[in-house]
Image: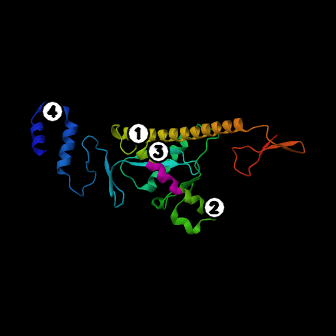
Amino acid sequence: MGKLLRALQRRQDVVSAQAEMLSRIEKLLVQGRKDKNKIYALHAPEVECLSKGKARQPYEFGVKASVAVTAKQGLVIGARTFPGNPYDGHTLEEQLQQTTILLQDIPSAPRPKRALVDKGYRGVTIPGVEILHPGKMRSMTPVQRKMMKRRSAVEPVIGHLKDDCRMRRCWLKGAMGDAIHAVLCAAGYNLRFLLRVIRIFCAWILWLSRVYQRVPLTQTRKLTGGTAWWSGPLYPAGYIKKFR
């Protein structure tokens, strides 16, 4: 690559047209193993080395992303990227700001009041927001401990975002493309979630209509106090359906 770089630098037309790319190549050739702000991809200089701390995959190359999920339903209400690989605790306030902005069009404009996070967010305080992490387990009330069990619900959501919604690789250019890609993946996840709920609801309505159509109304009935009782053949044994 060094010979190619010197050959390109001799041509004035190439130097004027590809000055930015040539500067990246020069930096790539002179950077050391433990230097900071290294270049890992010529076509995407914003790529960073993220330490995962896992034996299976100790490092990942990309941009740090944060995801906010509701504690009960599991809908994604916030997704954004943080260039520069900042400390996890420094990203919480910005993530909650994005969540508040995305929820402002909902009636009553709900705001996040409680954040369930991991130990990487220790020492972070945000006015008006209760932050719970496993390091506070001894001082928590039974209700807070029960809520803390829902923190792990974000892990399968992240897995589905990476595998099903294609968040594992971004095909958009630059830091702006990374931010747009994270939001689009979160929107796709929510659409899949809503379509699954609609499909289950329609299946339940279809099953219920077939049940009512096949229940014979000429079965033996017992009148007690003006109320009629029928036992349908499609119901489990011992189950009696009441019609008013």
User: In the figure, residue 105 lies in which quadrant?
Assistant: top right
Q: Earlier in the sequence, mark 2 or mark 4?
A: 4
Q: Is residue 63 left or right of residue 15?
A: right
Could you give the CA–CA distance between mark 2 and mark 4, rounded to whole angstroms?
66 Å
Q: Is residue 35 visible?
A: yes
- Give SS at disc 2: helix
In the displayed orientation, state which residue is furthest to the right. 225
Instruction: Please tell me which residue is depicted at 45% across the width and 60% down the height of the picture.
Output: 120
Q: Amino acid at mark 3?
A: Ala
The x and y percentages for residue 80 are 44, 44
State which mark lies toward you, 4 or 1: 1
Instruction: In this rendered view, identify the residue nearer to me: 9 or 64.
Output: 64
Q: Position of residue 86 (x, y in %)?
A: 39, 53
Q: Which residue corresponds to mark 2?
A: 143
Q: Quadrant of residue 219?
A: top right
- The 10 Å Cα crowd at callout 1, few under 14, some 14 to 19, many 20 or more, is many
Q: Amino acid at mark 2?
A: Val
Q: Going 48% across and 49% down the picture, which residue do you hit?
A: 157
> In the rendered image, which residue does mark 1 sit on?
181
> Are the two marked residues, 2 and 4, in contact with CB atoms closer than 8 angstroms?
no
Q: Position of residue 42 (x, y in %)?
A: 24, 42
Asked if one can make out residue 127 in the rendered structure from this viewpoint, the answer is no
Residue at numbered disc 4: 14
